[in-house]
Image (cartoon, helix red, strand yellow):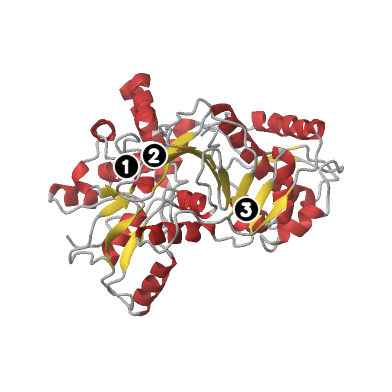
Amino acid sequence: MTGQPLYSAIVWLDVRTSKIVDELTKQKGTQSVSAVTQASGLPLSTYFSSVKLRWLLKNVIAVKDAIASNKCLAGTVDSWLIWNLTGGVHGGVHITDVTNASRTQLMSLRTLQWDKRLLRFFDVPIEILPKIKSSAEIYGYISVGSLLGVPIAGCLGDQQAALVGQGCMRFGQVKCTFGTGCFLLYNTGDSIVHSQHGLLTTVAYKMGPDSPPAYALEGSVAIAGDTLQWLRDSLGIISEVKDSEALAAQVGDGDEGSISFVPAFNGLYSPYWRKDARGVMCGLSERTRRQHIVRAALEAVCHQTRAVADAMAADCASLRQLLADGGMAQNSVLMQMQADLLGIPVIRPLMMESTALGAAIVAGRAMRVWPTTIPSPPADTFLPALTNEEREMRRVRWEEALNKCMGWTDTKNEHVNAEESDRTTAVLPPGLFFLGTALLVIIADKLKSM
């Protein structure tokens, strides 16, 4: 075992596995594909680790050779960090937690262990995978840097960490992280709810080895903050992402020049699951200015969030409020739009780093330095200001644009383009982790010595 990466990490939006998804669907049949969703809570999609790992096993010689010689370990980024921080080739522990494992599409939601049927379906050897642990227990001890000997005691996927950080510990509580994408989690308590409306079923957290798991429904919007980066980098109509708030405030929804925008740059995720969708702008006129485009980009995030919230209400119960966090949540115009289109209050905590807070909470619970219940942090509240008629009118208009974005891609050409494009930048996919803010010190310390 060398401890060296065998390939670059594959970004979560990467669609090189489209061909694998289509082949599996055709070869295995509808019944087998449905069984995968039933066991894992996830639809067969390019989104998840399972097909990305299958692609690596089939296409990267270094990975094939390492498996043949019993020298390959694979996992999500949390497992890679924990392995390195606890010693790496010198006795590092190869583990992950239930929340990260639940996003690989290889774990059974009921047993919380790797599922042999899923491993056979994706042709993944169990020997390379990490051991699955709870979200709050001591996994090992830091073996490098100034925090030598400090226990690593908390591990959560990023969205699950935000759920905990927002204090969404009861059935029916919902948080939304507005970032590069947009991710809603609905706490379903001890019930595994299989969505009938295009949502994912995932593990929310497991607060210790002997604690029962909590589950959640998740809705993922592929493009949120990325839309503003596209307006900045590709169209050049804003200088900084933060300018979007002031620009959007300069025009109203009913202004002449208003447009509808669906930023389906790489297809649509929840609740639509349409990889053939592509972005459209509808209603452009000579009166349309950059302010209208920026406002439409923000509104598109809110409409997609509303669609996910509607699906959650159909699967469980209507949302009473939405807890918001993430970089985009600092935009007050966006938060007010979201409250208007949902028709419920949107709560934004004054301390915005909910993900890091959630990681700290589970680590503190494992070390028994945090109480069982964590009080909700101070927050700003955005109340809806639209009538039901206005809200419905905006929904109908946006969905007219949504219907026009479907069926744009030639899937055969898409497979070729996906395989040829180098989209392997090492970035973090959404079923990831936060080990706690203390680990940032360790990583920085290690980088300084390199």
Label 1 Cα crowd, 10 Å radius (few <14 / some 14-19 / many 20+) = some
Q: Could you tell me residue 270's position as x and y percent? A: 54, 35
- Of the two numbered discs 3 and 2 on the same chain, state the one appearing first in sequence: 2
Q: Could you tell me residue 178's position as x and y percent? A: 59, 51
The residue identified by callout 2 is 17
Question: Helix, strand, or loop for circle 2?
Answer: loop
Q: Amino acid at mark 1?
A: Trp
Label 3 Cα crowd, 10 Å radius (few <14 / some 14-19 / many 20+) = some
Q: Residue 55 shows which numbered tag?
A: 1
Q: Could you tell me residue 47's position as x and y percent? A: 44, 41
Which of these two is toward me, 261 or 380? 380
Question: Helix, strand, or loop for circle 1?
Answer: helix
Rendered image quadrant of residue 3: bottom left
The residue located at (41%, 34%) in the rendering is 42
The residue identified by callout 3 is 230
Q: Residue 208 shows which numbered tag?
A: none
Q: CA distance from mark 3 to mark 2?
A: 24 Å
The reply to whether residue 8 is in sight is no
